[in-house]
Amino acid sequence: MNNYVTDISKSQEYISFRSNIPLRKIVVDSNQEWRIYDSGPKSVGCPLVCLPPVSGTADVFFKQLLGLSSKGIRVISAEHPVYWTVNDWCDGFKKLLDYLKLDKIHLFGASLGGFLAQKFAEYTHNHPRVASLILCNAFIDTSVFSYNESASIFWMLPSLVLKKMVMGNFTMQHTDKRIIESIDFMVEKLDSISQQELASRLTLNCVNCYVEPQNLTRIDNITIIDVFDDYALTSPVREEIYKVYPSAKLAHLKSGGNFPYLSRSDEVNLHLQVHLNRFLDSDLSAHERSKSEEIKPSET
């Protein structure tokens, strides 16, 4: 295992995060242990839940956990255990929400996390659990990846081979310091993921599966966050998701690479706030309600 510590891991911001927001380990069934960080006011019943990409652990959203919770927003980052099918993942995630007593949530998913967020909204469409979706560098069909045919044997491949497959999608030709730091940090996180965890995530990412948008018609609040510089997905993949969600709000970043929630956290957090502000005066608010917020502008 690589013992190199990245600049982000050494930063005061990350150290403060690890000191102040505890990692919780929650077993939902069959010793399946979810790892979550839960920040912000616990009185909020409809929080923002963040789902990481293949290479990410729950702490890759530490800038959202810190930044948004300081605005009175409850944010949970959830890292899943080993699941080999999307259906099993959805069932496990539903059990996690039941354990946390969360009836409805806002979902922010990055890459694989974005795909799983859509599949969970689809999985629960008869008894909706997803109030809204924010999709970052996401996709709707796993066929865009070149490993479809070999996905069934990922479980038996060595860790090193799996990590090379993931890192092949990292765009390294960057001069932007923050993007370089975000890649370094994600490589560090990737190194901490076990062979079984990584194999299962790659299986979910690559085995033939696609979103059925006709089952997502009840969700009319969707924001798509995209970057316009080099990242793992191609332009046709991006265009496809726009077609599926024609009424989605588009949040475009000029740059940010594969991990804009790290490299452009201020911009991403602003887009997340704008999205969540739509629910301020409803039962689906992710914000803590204060007396000052209950006063209408005309009364001040």
Image (cartoon, helix red, strand yellow):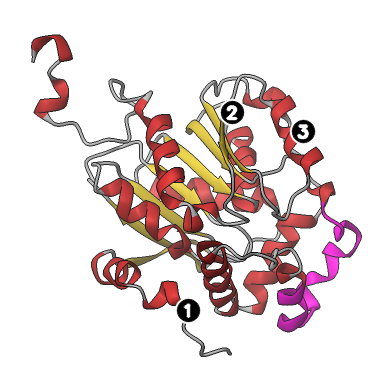
* Amino acid at dot 2: His
Query: Residue drawn 66% across and 74% down?
Result: 196
Query: Residue drawn 84% across and 64% down?
Result: 152
Q: Which of marks 2 and 1 is nearer the N terminus?
A: 1
Q: Earlier in the sequence, mark 3 or mark 2?
A: 2
The image quarter in which residue 150 lies? bottom right
**Residue hosting label 1:** 6
Provide the secondary structure element on which disc 1 rests.
loop
Q: What stretch is highlighted in magenta?
A: 145-164
* Residue contact between numbered discs 2 and 1, judged by CB atoms under 8 Å: no
* Label 3 Cα crowd, 10 Å radius (few <14 / some 14-19 / many 20+): few
Where does the N terminus fall, quadrant-wise? bottom right
Q: Which residue lies furthest to the top in this view?
A: 298
* Amino acid at dot 3: Glu
Query: Residue drawn 57% across and 89% down?
Result: 2
User: Measured from the top left, where is residue 127 in percent x and y?
Assistant: 52, 28
Q: Which residue lies furthest to the right in this view?
A: 149
**Residue hosting label 2:** 125
Residue 240 marker: 3
Q: Residue furthest front?
A: 175
Is 25 above or below relative to 145? below
Magenta residues, dominant SS class: helix
User: Measured from the top left, where is residue 126 in percent x and y?
Assistant: 58, 26
Provide the secondary structure element on which disc 3 rests.
helix
**Alpha carbons under labels 1 and 3: distance apart:** 35 Å
Q: Nearer the viewer, residue 251 or 131?
A: 251
